[in-house]
């Protein structure tokens, strides 16, 4: 078995950009006449891991696009590869195991093989068992490989036609290119089990039924895709990132819907980075660990609490494998907000449009603090931000000083050129040691700084937008959904980078987001938006962290407790003893 692998990320390899195959020209082994690095027929660099020497790493360090990886696999790895995309491409080990009557949650970094694993299980992609040169294998080879295990039993059912799969893909933003027509037509076509009216109501799709799919927002597309999946007659449903683009209340509605689907005849599997949603949806967890874009390994099934805790710990006691050198912790120590001078304040504000009105209480933000904003979409969060900047004039209330806001929008429209070109254009001191060390390195952007922005993944693009926002001169830094598209590790890093920046620069941030765990971790104070979507909005706050979180959880009808081991907030199962007691006492938040 291969214990060391070398991978070239073909998406990142840019032989023209690096000045004509820099790695091939500089490889010490090639200079000695060996062929460790070669030009492939696809116009990209190729590496032979049987020749390359992992102690050398010249190519890894020299590639300006971070395209080359040479890593050792864990010594204790006993699984066989399931799929390798090419001789020097990503390898996946093991398959997830669906379970009837259960929702199995999959947790792991972006680019670690979650979608690949699910596509293989769904039969959308045929695996090659790690031997790309010998071609695709059929289901009998997979069955042989898993003989004597639960996975074998599941694969036998797929083979005998007893499993029908319904799949909600991750990349819903691609749907408008793939399916044309009205939402109603798509749902009617999918409506095999006759639950269309129920789904339209539960997923709040009635207003968009006669709209063209290409005119839907991200949240509407997501709800339509979830509805279409639920409407299929299947006994294995899986949902790849169902919370993306959804607001905080929709996340919980979708989580409740998905939980209800698992029964004696039905297995459900979910991939999700929003830990609150994942924790709430899942009965069991499988971890996918490894190195993004290089290899991914799926663990056996674990109970939810243990699975998420082991993931955050970065250590798998059953296998004695440490897969991350640090623990992810949600404990922030002593809260310090409200003790620094006020940076700016706003009076009571009102604004009325033809069919929408909003009322906001007076408030203030202190230096170094992060004010979080949450609530359903269509309640005026963006209108509030625009009033602060002076882009929208309020009808009632006057802002003494208009503040300069550096704003990260929700929609990330890629610029032309490289990340460096963009930073050169807009960022004052992105070349300074401080910016490099505290922003670019912490967000792992140094290795992609020469890459074209249009080639970045969703998560990379989000982090570039955050870095660009932080590089502006401003009084207030506002971020609309900074957690979108990024995995748990990066959510924590983004939160730390934003918090540290505000303290160091004695300025403040406003963060609009829908991931409760992220809000809990990043925020000092909260504004909670209530009202009727698209008609009227009102705001509670600014509230202290405890009060604000209590307000959000009350609105969602869920209660939290604290996991003693990780200090991670966890959702109480609805109707559990703790849930009932906390609701009775009005203590929705554990603190
Ligand atoms: P995840 O769903 O965990 O984000 P994916 O399963 O989409 O990860 O991909 C895992 C890795 O496999 C990616 O980082 C990418 O490098 C590689 N990969 C995915 N699809 C292909 C492909 N068609 N050809 C080559 N490599 C691929
Ligand atoms: Fe150039 Fe990096 Fe591609 Fe090698 S891997 S050809 S150094 S871009």
Image (tube, grey):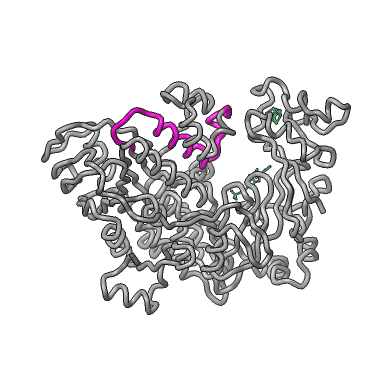
538 over 149 or under it: above or below: above
Viewport quadrant of the C terminus: bottom left
Farthest left residue in view: 396
577 over 447 or under it: above or below: below
Residue 534 at x, y percent in the picture: 25, 49
| Residue at 45% across, 68% down | 564
Q: Is residue 212 visible?
A: no
Dividing the picture into quadrants, the one containing residue 561 is bottom left
Residue 445 at x, y percent in the picture: 54, 35
Q: Nearer the viewer, residue 32 or 246?
A: 32
| Residue at 34% across, 32% down | 406
Q: Is residue 223 visible?
A: yes
| Residue at 50% across, 37% down | 461
Residue 446 at x, y percent in the picture: 56, 33
Tell whether position 193 is magenta. Answer: no
Tell whether position 472 is magenta. Answer: yes
| Residue at 50% across, 34% down | 437
Dividing the picture into quadrants, the one containing residue 368 is top left
Farthest bottom residue in view: 577
Q: Is residue 142 left or right of residue 161?
A: right
Q: Is residue 30 left or right of residue 344?
A: right
Residue 80 at x, y percent in the picture: 77, 58
Viewport quadrant of the N terminus: bottom right
239 over 384 or under it: above or below: below
Span highlighted in magenta in the image: 450-477
Count of numbered marks = 0
Q: Is residue 305 left or right of residue 44?
A: left
């Amino acid at each position: 078995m291969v214990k060391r692998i070398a991978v070239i990320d073909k998406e990142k390899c840019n032989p023209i950009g690096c000045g004509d195959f820099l790695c091939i020209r500089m490889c010490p082994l090639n200079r000695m006449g060996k062929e460790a690095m070669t030009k492939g027929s696809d116009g990209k660099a190729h590496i032979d891991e049987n020749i390359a020497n992992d102690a050398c790493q010249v190519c890894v360090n020299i590639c300006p696009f971070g395209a080359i990886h040479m890593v050792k696999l864990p010594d204790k790895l006993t699984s066989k590869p399931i799929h390798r995309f090419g001789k020097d491409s990503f390898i996946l080990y093991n398959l997830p195991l669906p379970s009837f009557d259960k929702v199995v949650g999959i947790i792991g970094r972006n680019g670690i093989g979650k979608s690949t694993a699910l596509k293989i299980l769904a039969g959308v992609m045929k695996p090659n068992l790690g031997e790309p040169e010998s071609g695709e294998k059929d289901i009998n080879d997979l069955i042989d490989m898993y003989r004597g295990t639960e996975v074998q039993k599941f694969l036998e059912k797929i083979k005998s036609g007893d499993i029908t799969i319904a799949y909600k893909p991750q990349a819903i933003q691609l749907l408008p290119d793939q399916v044309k027509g009205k939402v109603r037509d798509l749902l009617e076509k999918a409506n095999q089990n006759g639950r269309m009216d129920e789904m339209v109501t539960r997923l709040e799709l009635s207003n968009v039924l006669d709209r063209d799919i290409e005119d839907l927002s991200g949240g509407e597309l997501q709800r339509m895709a979830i509805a279409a999946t639920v409407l299929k007659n299947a006994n294995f449903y899986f949902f790849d990132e169902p919370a993306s683009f959804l607001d905080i209340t929709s996340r919980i509605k979708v989580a409740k819907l998905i939980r209800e689907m698992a029964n004696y005849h039905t297995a459900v599997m979910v991939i999700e980075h929003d830990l609150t949603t994942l924790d709430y949806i899942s009965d069991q967890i499988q971890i996918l660990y490894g190195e993004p874009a290089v290899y991914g390994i799926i663990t056996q099934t674990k109970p939810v609490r243990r699975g998420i805790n082991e993931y955050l710990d970065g250590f798998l006691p059953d296998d004695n494998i440490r897969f991350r050198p640090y623990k992810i912790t949600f404990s922030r120590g002593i809260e310090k907000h409200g003790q620094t001078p006020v940076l700016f304040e706003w009076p009571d504000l009102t604004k009325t449009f033809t069919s929408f009105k909003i009322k906001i209480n007076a408030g203030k933000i202190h230096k170094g603090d992060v004010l979080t904003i949450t609530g359903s979409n269509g309640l005026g969060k963006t209108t509030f931000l625009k009033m602060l900047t002076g882009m929208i004039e309020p009808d009632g209330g006057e802002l003494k000083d208009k503040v300069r806001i550096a704003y990260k929008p929700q929609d990330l429209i890629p610029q032309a050129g490289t990340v460096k070109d963009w930073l050169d254009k807009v960022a004052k001191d992105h070349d300074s040691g401080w910016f490099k060390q505290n922003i670019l390195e912490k967000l792992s952007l140094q290795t992609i700084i020469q890459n074209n922005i249009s080639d970045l993944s969703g998560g990379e693009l989000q982090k570039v937008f955050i870095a660009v926002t932080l590089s502006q001169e401003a009084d207030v830094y506002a971020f609309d959904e900074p957690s979108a598209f990024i995995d748990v590790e990066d959510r924590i890093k983004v939160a730390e980078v934003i918090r540290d920046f505000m303290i160091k620069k004695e300025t403040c941030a406003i963060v609009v987001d829908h991931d409760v765990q992220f809000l809990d971790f990043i925020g000092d104070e909260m504004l909670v938006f209530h009202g009727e979507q698209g008609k009227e909005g009102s705001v509670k706050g600014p509230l202290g962290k405890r009060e604000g979180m209590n307000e959000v959880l009350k609105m969602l009808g869920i209660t939290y407790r604290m996991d003693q081991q990780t200090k991670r907030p966890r959702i109480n199962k609805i109707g559990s003893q703790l849930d009932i007691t906390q609701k009775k006492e009005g203590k929705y938040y554990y603190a």
